[in-house]
């Protein structure tokens, strides 16, 4: 099933209009030439010019955005994902990189990641119509998968058959849709209502009450002579209970402390401490190698004169040796200010909580 709306805009000028406020003044000629070459379909030449431009303006978003588009056209999906992921980290207020990440994730069949990226695009720009339309297509694709699974489990499920046909019809070209409608004329299929069993509470029988039987008065026995009072016997002291064992340390607090240490190292531009917060089997985003990722992160930490990272925890969930933390991250440097929602998956290794996965979004 193909997406009709998960696509890149056709013209480079349209692609870059939202980023115009961030563009550097010079050298503009290389960027303009790269845009023209891209629009003409001369991708190798366009890439050459945009690389020349980015040598003098490595953080400039228009050039990086255009490079991501060229890589996409060249079917270099992993490299394009790396470029757009970097843009979401450096410019989280821009919706276009999130949208294009969703396009790339969807092309790989990773609809959960595509859905998260589109939700972030809408969060940053609620009136971004393209992201809303693309998100609708993602939901339709996820629905199609669910109906397919239902039919695998129950081939005679008429309701799922009708719903699956309706979803697939959304993605057919108009001509193909008309042909399919004229060729197939099935009779109406009535949707079977869901049967809900009514649970009746068990009937409890109340015990029958009987009037109390009158008993004859009992004769009181004669009172015995009053015994002499004996002094109270000493009660042996009970042995003291052992002190309860101390509770295990709060793992959630340990996870939060590890994340705060990661943010402090980042703010202090402590590259060694920052990288030490990641697990040996950390999975860099965008299929990037660990060595390339560390080199890129080192450059981004060392480049600004100052960095300030703030955290506001949303949720922390610990399950055995793994934890998931969601928080709002604020980032401020001498060149950029922004905020985003971030999710970290951590694992416990050697008594420490280390980051195994990192992604923007909940």
Image (cartoon, grey):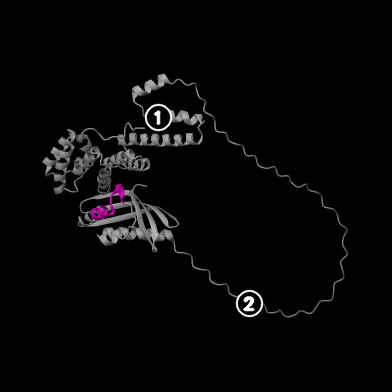
Q: Tell me if 184 is positioned left or right of 336 in this view.
A: right
Is 289 magenta? The answer is yes
Residue found 88% across the figure and 64% down from its top: 219
Q: Where is residue 29 in the image (x, y as percent from the top left)?
A: 11, 40
- Pick the front one: 176 or 238: 176
| Residue 283 shown left or right of residue 148 in the figure | left
Q: In this figure, which residue is indicated by the disc labeled 1?
A: 168
Asked if residue 271 shows in the view, the reply is: yes
**Looking at the image, do the residues carrying marks 2 and 1 touch, with CB atoms under 8 Å apart?**
no
Q: Magenta segment: does it hold 350?
A: no
Numbered label attached to residue 160: none
Question: Residue 239: where, in percent of width, then height?
Answer: 60, 75
Image: magenta residue range: 284-297
Give residue 203's position: percent from left, percent from top. Answer: 70, 42
**142 sits to left or right of 201:** left
Residue under the point 31% across and 32% down? 5
Q: Of helix, strand and loop, which mostly describes the magenta segment?
A: helix
Q: Residues within 10 Å of mark 2 (few under 14, many from 20)?
A: few
């Amino acid at each position: 099933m193909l997406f009709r709306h998960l696509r890149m805009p056709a013209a480079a000028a349209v692609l870059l209009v939202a980023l115009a406020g961030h563009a550097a003044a010079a050298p503009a000629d290389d960027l303009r030439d790269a845009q023209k070459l891209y629009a003409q379909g001369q991708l190798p030449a366009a890439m050459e010019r945009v690389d020349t431009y980015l040598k003098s303006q490595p953080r400039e978003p228009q050039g990086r955005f255009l490079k991501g588009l060229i890589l996409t056209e060249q079917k270099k999906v992993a490299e394009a994902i790396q470029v757009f992921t970097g843009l979401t980290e450096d410019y989280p207020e821009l919706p276009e990189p999130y949208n294009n990440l969703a396009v790339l994730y969807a092309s790989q069949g990773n609809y959960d990641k595509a859905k998260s990226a589109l939700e972030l695009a809408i969060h940053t720009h609620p009136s971004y119509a393209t992201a809303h339309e693309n998100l609708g297509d993602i939901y339709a694709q996820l629905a199609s998968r669910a109906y397919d699974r239902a039919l695998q489990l129950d081939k005679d499920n008429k309701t799922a058959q009708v719903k699956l046909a309706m979803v697939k019809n959304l993605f057919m070209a108009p001509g193909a849709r008309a042909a399919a409608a004229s060729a197939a004329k099935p009779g109406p299929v009535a949707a079977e209502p869901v049967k809900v069993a009514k649970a009746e509470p068990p009937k409890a029988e109340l015990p029958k009450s009987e009037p109390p039987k009158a008993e004859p008065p009992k004769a009181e026995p004669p009172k015995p002579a009053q015994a002499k009072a004996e002094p109270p016997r000493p009660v042996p002291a009970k042995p003291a209970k052992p002190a309860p064992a101390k509770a295990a340390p709060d793992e959630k607090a340990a996870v939060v402390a590890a994340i705060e240490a990661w943010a402090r190292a980042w703010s202090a531009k402590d590259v060694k401490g920052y990288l030490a917060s990641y697990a040996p089997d950390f999975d860099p985003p965008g299929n990037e190698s660990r060595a390339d990722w560390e080199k890129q992160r080192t450059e981004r930490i060392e480049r600004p004169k100052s960095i300030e990272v703030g955290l506001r925890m949303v949720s922390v969930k610990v399950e055995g040796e793994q934890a998931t933390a969601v928080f709002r991250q604020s980032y401020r440097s001498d060149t950029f200010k922004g905020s985003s929602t971030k999710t970290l998956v951590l694992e416990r290794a050697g008594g420490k909580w280390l980051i195994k996965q990192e992604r923007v979004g909940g």
